[in-house]
Every structure is written in C-alpha cells, then in structure tokens.
Image (cartoon, helix red, strand yellow):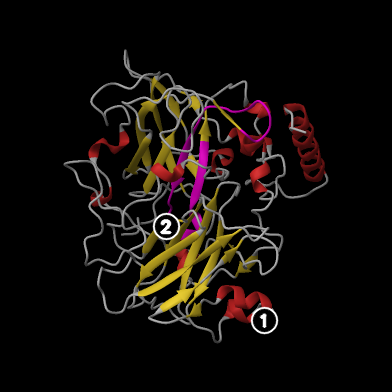
Amino acid sequence: MALTQSDIDTEVSDLQDAYDKAVAEGAPVQNHPPRDYAPYRSSVLRYPKQPLVAVSGGDPETVELSGPVFGVTDITEIDSDLTIQHQGEPLGERITVSGRLLDRSGRPVRGQLIELWQANASGRYAHLRDQHPAPLDPNFTGVGRLLTDDQGRYRFTTIKPGAYPWRNHTNAWRPAHIHFSVFGTAFTQRLVTQMYFPNDPLFRYDPILRSVTDEAARNRLVAEYNHDLSQPEFSLGYEWDIVLDGPSATWIEEGRD
Amino acid sequence: MSPSPASPVSPVSPENLRPTPSHTVGPFYGYALPFPEGEQVAPKGHPDTVTLHGYVLDGAGDPIPDALLEFWQAAPDGSLSGAPGSLRRDPVTGGFLGRNGTDFTGFGRVATDADGHYALYTLPPGNVGLPYISVCVFARGLLTHLYTRAYLADGADPLLDSLPAERRATLVATEGERRTYRFDIRLQGEGETVFLEFE
C-alpha cells in the first residue's frame, strides 16, 4: 500500500517528540540530521549502523584539518549570476541571495568556494532524471559558484525556485530550496545543505527538512527576507549566513579547541 | 593560500554561531558538482600515477549509482597546502578547461557511474605516517556526508591500530596490478566501512 502524507506525518511527529523529550531530559542538542531518519525513505539502506570512529584532535598533521583551495581560475565572472548565463532572461521572480560564510568561532572564511544548484521557477531541474511535467526554461540552468570575498561574504543573483513533487510518498512535495555546497579551510568543515525561503507552507510536510529534528537548527536553514538587499525594480533580497562545523588546523594552532 | 585568522567583521550573536545543519546532496547535483577531470588529480601521463577505484554499496549490497565522492590528500612531498585549479574554467565559453597539467591540487571529485563504480587517478600521498587519501561521501538518501580514509599501505597507525582486525581491513585499499588500489565503500551492513568523525 502506498505511503500517504499522513503516514509520514505520524513518523515525523513521533521522531520529533522523541527528540524534544530527550533534550528536555538533558540530551545534547543535535545540529545536524540523524543519518537514520526513516521518514526520508532513501536513507534506510544508506546510513552506517556502526558508530563513527573519532579521530583524536590535536595532531596538526591530520590531513583532514587542511583542505582544498580554489582561486580565480576556478570561477568565471558570470558564475554568480544565474540570470545571465543564456541568451534570454529566465522566467521567474529574480532574487539576490547574500550572506556570510563563517567558521564556528565566527571568523569569516575568505576566498573559499561556494557552489549552488536549484530547480527553475517551475520547480524543474535541468537534469535528465527530473521528468515531472513542469517546463524546462531554456534560459536557466540553475548552477552557480563563486569565491567568498575578503569579509567572507557571498552574493548570488538568481530566480526563486519552485516547489516540486517527489516520490518519497504519495503527494510528496519539496518546499522551494537552493542547494549549497561549501568549503572551509579544513576538509572537516565541508558542508552540503539546502537553503529555504521564509514561511513556506510545505515546511511541515517535508521529511527532509524535518530530519533536522532540532527546531532552532531547522530555522537556521531558512533565509531571511532583507528589504535592504532588494534591488529597486530588479530583485528581492534574501540573507542567509552559513556557519561551518568541524575543527580546522587554525583552531589547534591557536589552542582554541 | 589559507585565509589568515582574523576577528569577525561584525559581532555575531551566539545563535548565529551555531552550525548550519547538513542536508542530503539529493538526486540532482549531477549537472552542478561534477566537473571534467575531477578524477584526474595526477597530471596526465605522470609516471607515478596510482589508480584508486572501487564500488560504493548500500546496506543490501547493491551499488549506489548516485553517490558523489570527494578526495583530499597530501602532495607527494607531504605538503597540505593544496593548489587552486581543480575546476579551471574557460572565461570565453564558460566551460571547463580541465586541470593545467602541472599543479597538484590535492582535490578530486568523482560521481559513481551506473554500476556504483568510481576511479581516481592521483599521485601517492606523502603525508606523515602511512599514506592515506581522505574520502568524503555524499549520496541521495545520506542526510549528512560521511568521512573515511583509503590507506594505500598497512602498518602502524593510531587510527588503524584502534580498530578490530575486521573493521581495520575496511580502511586499507587492496593493491593490484599496475599501481591500482581497490577501495570499496559499504555504507551499511556486512563489511560496513569505518566512517570517521573529527573533534
């Protein structure tokens, strides 16, 4: 029998209650989603059952405490503007998405690579496997990248992606989101995540967003509308800061771990 | 190239300093993240090139055709500073130029094929201790990425020595002919790969 939204809602709600209860009883807050989160059905065979093995910190020669670097050869100037990559203008609501990339002590991460990808305004990805009946836009691919500036800031021009259906359960819809891929100064800080838009009515139905069981953490995935970022007669502004987790060599050198 | 430490540009409230949660890479990253020559970390034709390859498998033992692997390692001389140019771009066409054929960036990115197979062409890592390549695994269905290591030799090592023999074996690549190393990644179940966390 096909899974209904109601079935998924029950599972999500049970896991939410269990998390809230555990935290109320003193369990640590979880900033990241658990990998074994059954309401997201694709996770069931794809998470390790053995606990992760901790690599002791403090050894600056640990390879993962450094990470890849990128430079001006790795981007082109138009990569950060997804609306000018084709002959014509893409359809949809033009937006500016901007914020800071910080490490976990609040320092800006400078000159690092941020990549993003997203569906078009109709909710369709320029990917062969996305065959749901929404139109492709010949003037929109939905891929961007840039290097953060010397204050750790980033700024993309794009269009607001549409919500789209998926097959986790019957009538499953993803809230509008933009995928982000982010590097810090250490490989341990690597982050791939998704940014959402404020007040989306689909939030409560989405097992991927709800996999972040901590409500405050979940809210950190939602950008804020910022009128000062909006460009007159051009775009609406959304602000979203990204804070990387994980240790880096800089931390250890400064004895701040 | 590492950015130098500095104080925050403006005060950041404690709540804003909490980490941004991870999310799955999903099924549709394929036109965004992989890039030509992502697997070609060694300069093409370099005589010291080694091939690291294998399959990414799920808890039923089935290949995962939509996993994305990233690799980070020391240069042959032990340097961990890396170099730009992994995804060198063509400012004329907006396409990719491929790597410049001389710099060793230390970074590779490879999507698994329809058989769940990947291959990385690189130079032997010169890190302190046993040589290893750090691997970061992304996949549809995986809500937070996973780290592991592909060791290209066995021997004394603080991490390997802390593991029971059966689990230790999951981190040591099997050397084959022509400088080829086989390293399978099993996300779950029998022979599950050891995955790491860093504190």
Q: Which residue is mark 2?
A: B110
Dot 2: element = strand
Is B167 displayed left or right of A145 in the figure? right
* Above-or-below relation of A36 to B154: above
Q: Chain of mark 1?
A: B
- Residue A206: x and y in percent read 65, 31
Asked if residue A210 shows in the view, the reply is yes
Q: Earlier in the sequence, mark 2 or mark 1?
A: 2
**Is disc 2 surrounded by few (<14), some (14 to 19) or many (20+) residues within 10 Å?**
many
In this rendering, position of residue A29 left or right of residue A18: left
Q: Amino acid at mark 1?
A: Ala
| Amino acid at dot 2 | Val
Q: Give yes or no for residue B155 being in the magenta stretch.
A: no
Residue A56 coordinates in the image, percent (x, y) = 59, 70
**Magenta region:** A167-194
Q: Quadrant of residue A211?
A: top right
Residue A251 appearing in the image: no
Q: Is residue A114 left or right of residue A72?
A: right
Q: Nearer the viewer, residue B179 or A9?
A: B179
Where residue A234 is drawn, which disc sits there?
Answer: none
x and y percentages locating residue A231 in the rendered image = 33, 19
Q: Nearer the viewer, residue B125 or A44?
A: A44
Q: What residue appears at the point 25 percent right and 35 percent down from the top-left corner?
A: A78
Instruction: Decide: is B199 above or below A46.
Output: below
Label 2 and label 1: CA atoms lie apart by: 29 Å
Is A177 part of what is drawn in magenta?
yes
**Location of residue A224 in the rendering, given as x and y in whole percent from the top left corner:** 50, 26
Any mark on residue B165, and which?
1
Q: Quadrant of the N terminus of chain A?
A: top right
